[in-house]
Amino acid sequence: MWFFRSPEIIFGEDSLSFLKDLRINRCLVITDNFLLKSGLLDKLFRNLPESSKRMVIGDISPEPTFREMTGRIEEIRKFNPDYVIGFGGGSSMDTSKILFALNERPDLDVYDITPLVPLGLRKKSRLIAIPTTSGTGSECSWAAVLSEEGEKRKSELASPEILPDYAILDPDLVVSLPKEQTKNTAADALTHAIEGYVSSWNNPFSDAMSEKAIDLISSNIETVLKDPENIDARNSVHIGASMAGLSFSNSQIGLAHALGHSLGAYFKLAHGKTVALFLPNVIDFNYNVSAQKFEKLNSIVPERYRKKKFSDTLRGLFRSMGVEGSIEECGITRKEFEQNLDGLVSLASESTGCLTNPRESSTSDIRELFRNSYARLR
Ligand SMILES: [Fe+2]
C-alpha cells in the first residue's frame, strides 16, 4: 500500500488573497529577519482579516536548532493560534511545522515526531506554508529539519500530520528574490526532481511530478535569471519547485543530497549549491541502474541544453545558470578539503539518501564521489 500526500495547493497570481477566505482569528506567523524588514510581510498582513490578532516570530536563522525554534513556545501556547503560517524559506516553514505540533501537544518530545506515532494534531489549529523562495519544497513536505546544538549533524523529523493543510504559491512573493538565491534554490529543486525520480521509492505519482517540474524549471530558469520580474516565468519555476518537493517528499532523495548535506555542514555553504555540484557525478555513478529514466529526463530538458549524456546536459544547464560546478569553485582549498574528507565521508554515509539512492554505495564509492567532485570536469 502506497500513499501520495499533498497539501491543498493554491497557486498563481494573487493566490495570497485566498487567506481572506479563511476565518483566521489568531494567527501565528513564523518568518526570518530579512523578511521581517522587507515589504513582503506587509503583503501577507494585507491579506489577513483586519480583525485577526497576530503574533510574529521573526528571528528564525537559516539552520535553526531546537532551542532557537522553541524559545517562545510558552508565549505561543498562551496566544493560542487557530492558524500557524510558515512564511519564508525552508527554515521558517520547517520551524512552523515543529511549533504547530508542539503548541498542540505540550507533552510531546520533538523526537516523537515520526511517521509511526499518531500525534492527534489539528484539534486547535491549521498549518499554512507560504514559500518566498522557489526550491526547498518544504511547503509540500511532511518533514522538518532540525540542526543539532553544537554538532554538524541535522535531524530530519517526519510525520504526515505536519504536512501543511495549505501551500500558497504566489509568484509575487518571489519576483524580488536575489539572483544568487534564485539560482541556488532552482538548482536544489532540479536536484529534488531528479533524485526523487530515480529513488528506490519512486512511484507513478512522484514520477509525474518530477517530469513536469524539470520541464517547468529548465524551460523558464534562463528567463527568470535574465528578467527576474517576468511573472509568468517566475510562476512556472515556483510551481515547478513545489512539484519537485511533492516528488521527493513522496519518494526520497539520493546521494547528491547525502553528499551535499555533509559538505554544507562542514563548510556552511548554501544548500542548493552543495547538492547541485554533486548531481552530475552522482548521475554518472547511478547511470546503469536507471539508464532509461535518465534518458527520459534528458528528452524533457529544452534542446538547447541537451547533450548525449544527461549528466552533461545538467553540467551545461547549471553552468548557464551560474551554479558552481565543483567543491573548488565554492572556495574550498584542496588542503581544507583533504583535511576534512574522512568526516565528510562519514557524515554523508549516515544520510537516508544513501538508502534510497538507486545504486548501493560503499564508503569508498562515497569517498571517490567526493574526490571526483573537488575539481570540475574539464
Ligand atoms: Fe534539497
Image (spheres, grey):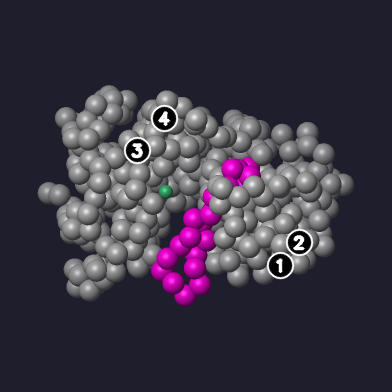
The residue under label 4 is 203
| 91 drawn magenta | no
First in residue order: circle 1 vs circle 3: 1
For the view shown, which residue lies furthest in the left direction? 378
What's the residue at 67%, 50% (across, down)? Answer: 119
Q: Helix or strand or loop: what does disc 2 sit on?
A: helix
Classify residue 51 as left or right of residue 37. Answer: right
- Mark on residue 72? 1
In the image, the segment drawn in magenta is: 144-164
Q: Do the residues labelled 4 and 3 touch (CB within 8 Å)?
A: no
Type of the residue with mark 1: Arg
Residue 237 coordinates in the image, percent (x, y): 46, 35
Q: Do the residues labelled 1 and 2 touch (CB within 8 Å)?
A: yes
- Mark on residue 200? 3
Classify residue 94 as left or right of residue 313. Answer: right
The answer to whether the residue bearing label 4 lies less than 8 angstroms from the nearest atom of ligand 1 is no
Say few, some or many: other residues with alpha carbon within 10 Å of mark 4 (under 14 / 14 to 19 / 20 or more): some
Q: Do the residues labelled 4 and 2 touch (CB within 8 Å)?
A: no
Relative to 323, does residue 15 appear above or below in the rendering? above
